[in-house]
Amino acid sequence: MLNILIVEDEPLLADTLKRLIELNPLHRVTGIADDLASALASAEAAPPELALVDLQLANGSTGYGVAARLHDLGIACLFTTGRAPGIPVPDLAIGCLSKPFREEDLVRALGEAEDILRGRRRIVLHARLPEPLQLYTGDAPAAEPAPWLPPVRSRTSIWARIMRHVRRPSRFRSAAEAELNSPT
């Protein structure tokens, strides 16, 4: 079971996240916090394994400060924010799920986060992550599958390439022309 702490300053969104997370019986929300103090209190009361942290919080708190303190407690963070950080911050979070996101994106993000936390190797390599999800784990992105057709070497059509090798009567030299043009 994955225990999750939600750190979100908008109560309606926090409640919606809680309901979506608890649709999976293997996930449990241990608490909802809206700033640094309540996040630390919730983490001490019921230690989570993962925290979903918004970057803009109530009472002047920021998600970066919350993530740093939770990281010190050994709790991994996944940012959920409308404005994703411009650069990856793997020291504070395992990734960022940008708002707005769909239920499928949240499910996939929690699955990826749980795999990272549990140290699981991926059996199924997904070609790409959902658009709102960015992971900071440092893994190389999965390579695109090889095309089933060989690459096109030139922009010349197949008909033009065939006709280049076909000899046309206009290209034949007659014996008389060859004798006239040959140095004697």
Image (cartoon, rainbow, N blue to C red):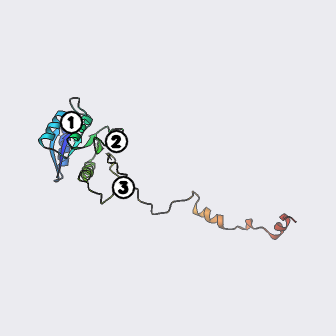
The picture places residue 123, in percent across and down from the top left corner, at: 30, 60
Residue found 25% across the figure and 48% down from its top = 106
N-term-proximal mark, 3 vs 2: 2
Badge 1 amino acid: Glu
**As drawn, is 31 to the left or to the right of 52?**
left
Please, which residue is most extreme toward the right here? Answer: 184
Q: Quadrant of residue 119?
A: bottom left
Secondary structure at numbered mark 2: loop
The picture places residue 98, in percent across and down from the top left corner, at: 30, 42
What residue would you read off at disc 1?
A: 10
Disc number lying in front (3 or 2): 2
N-term-proximal mark, 2 vs 1: 1
Secondary structure at numbered mark 1: loop
Please, which residue is most extreme toward the left here? Answer: 45
Q: Which mark is residue 116?
A: none
What residue would you read off at disc 2?
A: 88
Residue found 16% across the figure and 46% down from its top = 29
Q: Quadrant of residue 184?
A: bottom right
Residue found 31% across the figure and 59% down from its top = 124
* Vertical comparison of 184 with 59: above or below: below
Badge 2 amino acid: Pro
What residue would you read off at disc 3?
A: 127
Badge 3 amino acid: Ala
